[in-house]
Amino acid sequence: MSTPLDPLIFEFDTAEEADAYDLWFRAEVEASLAETGPGIPHDQVMAEMDAIIVAAEARRSKQM
């Protein structure tokens, strides 16, 4: 049985959904912390994110 949560307080509809997300999130953080490969330079990440934003804005302006 699902335990409903108050939507004004919680992001998830049920306690089970919240618990499942918490487990997934913790596993992702653990995997990231355990990664030993080289990091990505900040400037490279920012350039990639800027390109994603520009592309999304272009798609949105075409839809309008």
Image: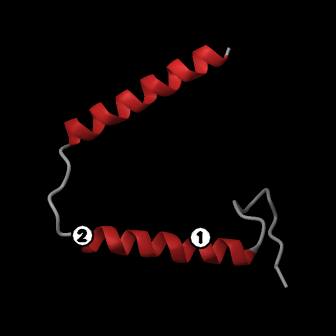
Residue most extreme to the left: 38
Q: In which quarter of the image is the C terminus?
A: top right
Asked whether, in this view, residue 32 is left or right of residue 26, the answer is left
Q: Mark 1 points at which residue?
A: 21
Label 2 Cα neighbours within 10 Å, binned few <14 / some 14-19 / many ≥20: few
Residue 55 place in picture, x, y as percent: 45, 25
Label 1 Cα neighbours within 10 Å, binned few <14 / some 14-19 / many ≥20: few
Asked whether, in this view, residue 6 is left or right of residue 64, the answer is right
Residue nearest the observer in this picture, 22 or 35: 35
Vertical arrangement, residue 64 with respect to residue 51, above or below: above
Q: Which residue is drawn at 26% across and 74% down?
A: 34
Considering only order in the chain, which callout, 2 or 1, is on the residue closer to the N terminus? Answer: 1
Vertical arrangement, residue 55 with respect to residue 16, above or below: above
**Could you tell me the amino acid type at mark 1?**
Tyr
Q: Which residue is drawn at 83% across and 72% down?
A: 4
Q: Which residue is drawn at 38% across and 69% down?
A: 29
Residue 8 place in picture, x, y as percent: 79, 56
Vertical arrangement, residue 46 with respect to residue 7, above or below: above
Residue 3 circle label? none
Vertical arrangement, residue 58 with respect to residue 10, above or below: above
Q: Is mark 1 on a helix, strand or loop?
A: helix
Residue 35 circle label? 2
